[in-house]
Image: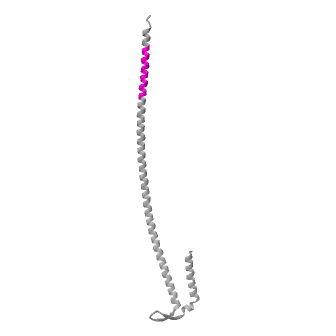
Amino acid sequence: MQLRSVVLLLTVLAIAALAALNWPALAEPSAVSLGLTTIEAPLGLIMLALTALLGVFFVAYVLSLQGSVLMETRRHTKELQAQRELADRAEASRFTELRAFLEAQHQQAHAAVLHRLDALEAHLAARAQETDNTTAAYVGQLEQQLRDRESRATVITPIV
């Protein structure tokens, strides 16, 4: 228990103990002035009843205060939950936008790589064609030189 609760409980117990131990004095009738008139009543019991009534009002006030704090806490919790959901949706939206952006970047990079590969493939095909042409030209030159040698060799050899 908290210190306040212990002090309050000890105070209530002290009042109850004093009332029980001094019951004859509390119940003894005396003249009580109400302002306009005076009546004969036990002043101790009146004071004890007023103290009990004050305690009841105090407890009712504390309970109403606690209830209002509880309702306010509940309202704040609902607002906090709504804000948390809003933040989660915003974060999910940002992730979706980031994913779309990254996919677009990936598509652009992929298209650039494919374009570059096509260019390299075309360049490689052109180089292969040039190599084929060069090789064919060399082979043609060699064939021509061999024919020229054969024709010179037949021209030089006398017919016997």
Please report the residue visible at 51 percent of the width from the left and 85 percent of the height from the top. Answer: 51
Say whether residue 18 is magenta: no
Q: Is residue 143 above or below residue 8?
A: above
Q: How many marks?
A: 0
Outermost right residue: 21
**Dominant secondary structure of the magenta stretch?**
helix
Q: Quadrant of the N terminus?
A: bottom right
Q: Which residues are magenta?
A: 129-149
Which colouring convention does the figure follow? one colour
Which residue does the image show at 42% across and 17% down from the upper left?
A: 144
Position of residue 156 relative to residue 72, above or below, is above
Image position, residue 13 (x, y; %): 57, 82
Magenta run includes residue 136: yes
* Residue 129 sits above or below residue 70 on the image: above
Q: Residue furthest top?
A: 160
**Residue at screen point 43% across, 60% down:** 87
Which x, y percent locates residue 135?
43, 24
Q: Is residue 21 left or right of residue 38?
A: right
| Percent of width and height locating residue 3 | 57, 76
Quarter of the picture holding the C terminus:
top left
Question: Residue at coordinates 52% horizontally, 94% vertically from top-left?
Answer: 30
The answer to which of 70 and 139 lies nearer the viewer is 139
